Image: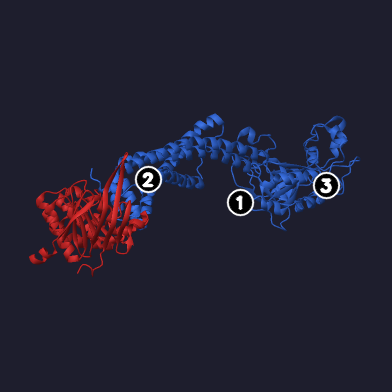
Chain colours: A red, B blue
């Protein structure tokens, strides 16, 4: 079954080596993985395992030392920074651990922001942003500044912002790292729902095995190597 | 990204840091104002010189005299040693007209005429010129106009000619009483061309003795009633080159003179050794108009080569202008120092704001804001500081300029003796240039910070503090 589908993300033999003084640190030490359209994947590892580095490379925020990262047919390792920015603008949504909303903008403007980079007229992008804020359940908080919202609400705005550009892939970097467990679960459920409903591919990085349980597939990464891939598809199907 | 979205974002960023933006703008404002005010001082100096120049003869007119009339004044012996003086005749006029860049040549015939109305009498300094020359002078009339063709001899009065009239019986004039003679120029005046015989006929009794026989024979000369064609604009205070003169068409003046002095020499005209007049009329000077003051030097040399003495009033204007230019440079340089300091202020503010917003810039990059947009955003911020500072600085400069001209004028007048002179003059181009310069300074100051912002790593956004 897997062989028939073409992966949307395909990583081959990926290395990232940092030089700290005289010593070399292998953050990624030969990673191979394939992620298919519509999948919700989690990359799980302890801190320093290289999971964030992997995510950065998938999103084109960092250059690999060696190896291939292909999103669809685009090879990120061959792109220059301008092309990478365009790639992120056109195809990627990003959810941050620290929410990273612009503090001077209200929720609506924050969600609409990525559309402005595409040159979408103000009216259209605000309309679209308002629609997404409703989807994430923040219809009443549209004109609140980030400082007037709780962490959970802020992260919902973050999710809406990632969705507004209608991306093919959403990357989430410890999306619940700054939230308490109850809100974490809420946000995770929201993300899960959105991915399923809108058929997005989601790649999430976390250190929490429990949160990783929301994903369809879990990559365990230790010392820059993927050591275990957990399939939860069947489980999910059983649940349904 | 759309242009207006970019601008809106830049401005909202500036607005977020009101106090710092305000302080930076303050720096630019002071810099701009100091440049503008400093340069305006120099410009006003230049302008007032040019205006003085303009009022005492245009920059594009050259007077041509016969050789020696200036140089050997009071040293007649030298004049004789040089070859025969070339006088200004009709041929001279034609000759001068041949010189390139000369647009107009007119003879100038200068005679003294007595004018009378009622009790008042006055000497008129009459200049007969060609009609074209009169027209080219752009005379500013209080009323009337240049004598029309076919009108016969009529005069244009300068606005200060009135001062020359005095009461014939008391001898009191404007200079004695300070009261303007009651002469109505709209009514015709009587003109006496032959002054010599007029005075002779007026005072027959005084000249007793050996001259008795002569004076008794003199009958008063004929008076002519002639109209006034117009009076130049201005009161007794406004001095122009023309304000003391009386002008008329030389074509009408000459026949009149010839009629009056049938066989005698017209006063002012040279005579032969036997006291007879020459057949030809010799003009006092030629009025030459050129198309551009840049050619004045060339043309003057040509005129010298022809054997005449040119006189260009604006000769010293050029040296004066050069001097003022260097003054302006020094003044502008002093102002530029403060704008330079302001530029450092802008660069500093922008750098600070980039450090503060490192994370935010990173977020923008992760979300797909293109590099050039980020650069433009920061450049726009820096130039907005320049623009706002420039505008406020300009307003300040106009204020200072106004204050200088209104309150400083009395002070300046006391020092320089020029009461009417402007101290500060901000022409339109200076305002525009200052504004453009302020924006440019902002952009240059913001250029490196903007590059820095552009090159910031997007990873900064994801790194957790």
The answer to whether any part of residue B60 appears in the image is no
Q: Residue furthest left?
A: A239
* Alpha carbon distance from label 3 to label 1: 32 Å
Q: Pointer 3 and pointer 1: residues touching (CB < 8 Å)?
A: no
Q: Chain of mark 1?
A: B
Q: Say which residue label 2 marks.
A: B452
As drawn, B70 above or below B282: above
Q: Residue at x 63, y 48 (%)?
A: B231
Left or right side of B103 for A55: left
Q: Position of residue A83 (x, y in %)?
A: 36, 57
Mark 1 or mark 2: which comes first in sequence? 1
Q: Of the residues tagged 3 and 1, which is closer to the observer?
A: 1
Q: Say which residue label 3 marks.
A: B261
Residue B143, disc: 1
- Image quadrant where residue B4 sits: bottom left
Q: Nearer the viewer, residue B442 or A76?
A: A76
* Alpha carbon distance from label 1 to label 2: 70 Å
Quarter holding the C terminus of chain A is bottom left
Quarter holding the N terminus of chain A is bottom left
Mark 2 or mark 3: which comes first in sequence? 3
Q: Of the residues tagged 2 and 3, which is closer to the observer?
A: 2
Q: Residue at x 67, y 46 (%)?
A: B294
- Other-residue count near label 2 (Cα within 10 Å), few / some / many at <14 / 14–19 / ≥20: some
The answer to whether any part of residue B431 appears in the image is yes
């Amino acid at each position: 079954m897997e062989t028939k589908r073409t992966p949307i993300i395909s990583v081959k033999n990926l290395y990232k080596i940092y030089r700290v003084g005289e010593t070399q640190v292998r953050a990624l030490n030969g990673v191979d993985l394939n992620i298919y359209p519509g999948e919700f994947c989690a990359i799980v590892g302890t801190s320093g395992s290289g999971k964030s580095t992997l995510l950065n490379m998938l999103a084109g925020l960092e250059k690999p030392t060696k190896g291939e990262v292909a999103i669809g047919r685009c090879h990120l390792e061959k792109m220059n920074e301008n092309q990478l920015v365009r790639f992120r603008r056109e195809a990627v949504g990003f959810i941050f651990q620290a929410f990273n909303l612009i503090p001077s903008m209200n929720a609506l403007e924050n969600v609409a922001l990525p559309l402005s980079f595409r040159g979408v007229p103000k009216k259209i992008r605000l309309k679209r942003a308002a629609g997404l804020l409703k989807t994430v359940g923040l219809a009443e908080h549209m004109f609140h500044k980030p400082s007037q919202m709780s962490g959970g609400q802020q992260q919902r705005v973050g999710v809406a912002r990632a969705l507004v550009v209608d991306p093919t892939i959403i990357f989430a970097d410890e999306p619940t790292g700054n939230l308490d467990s109850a809100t974490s679960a809420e946000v995770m459920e929201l993300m899960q729902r959105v991915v399923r409903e809108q058929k997005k591919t989601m790649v999430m990085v976390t250190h929490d095995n429990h949160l990783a349980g929301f994903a369809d597939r879990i990559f365990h990464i230790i010392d820059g190597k993927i050591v275990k891939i957990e399939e939860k598809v069947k489980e999910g199907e059983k649940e349904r | 990204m759309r242009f207006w979205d970019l601008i809106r974002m830049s401005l909202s960023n500036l607005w977020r840091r009101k106090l710092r933006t305000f302080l930076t703008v303050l720096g630019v404002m002071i810099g701009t104002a100091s440049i503008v005010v400093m340069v305006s001082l120099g410009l006003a100096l230049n302008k007032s010189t040019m205006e003085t120049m303009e009022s005492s003869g245009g920059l594009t007119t050259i007077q041509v005299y016969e050789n020696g009339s200036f140089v050997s004044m009071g040293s007649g012996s030298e004049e004789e040693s040089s070859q025969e003086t070339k006088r200004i005749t009709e041929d001279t006029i034609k000759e001068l007209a041949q010189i390139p860049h000369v647009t107009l040549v007119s003879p100038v015939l200068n005679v003294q005429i007595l004018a009378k109305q009622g009790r008042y009498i006055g000497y008129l300094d009459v200049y007969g010129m060609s009609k074209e020359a009169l027209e080219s002078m752009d005379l500013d009339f209080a009323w009337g106009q240049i004598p029309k063709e076919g009108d016969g001899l009529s005069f244009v009065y300068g606005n200060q000619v009135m001062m020359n009239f005095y009461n014939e019986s008391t001898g009191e004039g404007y200079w004695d009483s300070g009261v303007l003679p009651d002469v109505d120029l709209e009514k015709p005046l009587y003109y006496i061309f032959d002054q010599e015989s007029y005075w002779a006929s007026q005072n027959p009794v005084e000249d007793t003795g050996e001259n008795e026989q002569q004076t008794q024979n003199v009958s008063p000369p004929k008076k002519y009633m002639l109209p006034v064609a117009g009076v130049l604009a201005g009161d007794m205070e406004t001095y122009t080159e023309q304000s003391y003169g009386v002008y008329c068409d030389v074509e009408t003046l000459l026949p009149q003179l010839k009629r009056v002095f049938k066989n005698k020499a017209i006063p002012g005209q040279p005579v032969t050794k036997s006291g007879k007049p020459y057949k030809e009329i010799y003009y006092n000077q030629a009025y030459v108009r050129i198309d551009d003051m840049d050619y004045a030097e060339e043309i003057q040399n040509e005129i010298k080569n022809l054997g005449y003495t040119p006189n260009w009033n604006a000769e010293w204007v050029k040296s004066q202008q050069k001097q003022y230019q260097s003054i302006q440079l020094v003044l502008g340089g002093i102002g530029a120092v403060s704008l330079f300091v302001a530029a450092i202020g802008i660069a500093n503010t922008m750098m600070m704001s980039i450090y503060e917003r490192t994370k935010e810039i990173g977020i923008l990059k992760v979300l797909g804001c293109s590099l050039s947009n980020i650069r433009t955003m920061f450049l726009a911020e820096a130039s907005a500081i320049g623009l706002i500072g420039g505008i406020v600085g300009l307003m300040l400069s106009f204020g200072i300029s106004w204050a200088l001209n209104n309150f400083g004028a009395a002070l300046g007048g006391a020092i320089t003796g020029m009461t009417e002179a402007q101290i500060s003059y901000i022409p339109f181009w200076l305002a525009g240039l200052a504004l453009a310069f302020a924006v440019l300074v902002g952009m240059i100051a913001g250029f490196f910070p903007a590059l820095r912002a552009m090159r910031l790593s997007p990873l900064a956004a994801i790194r957790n503090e």
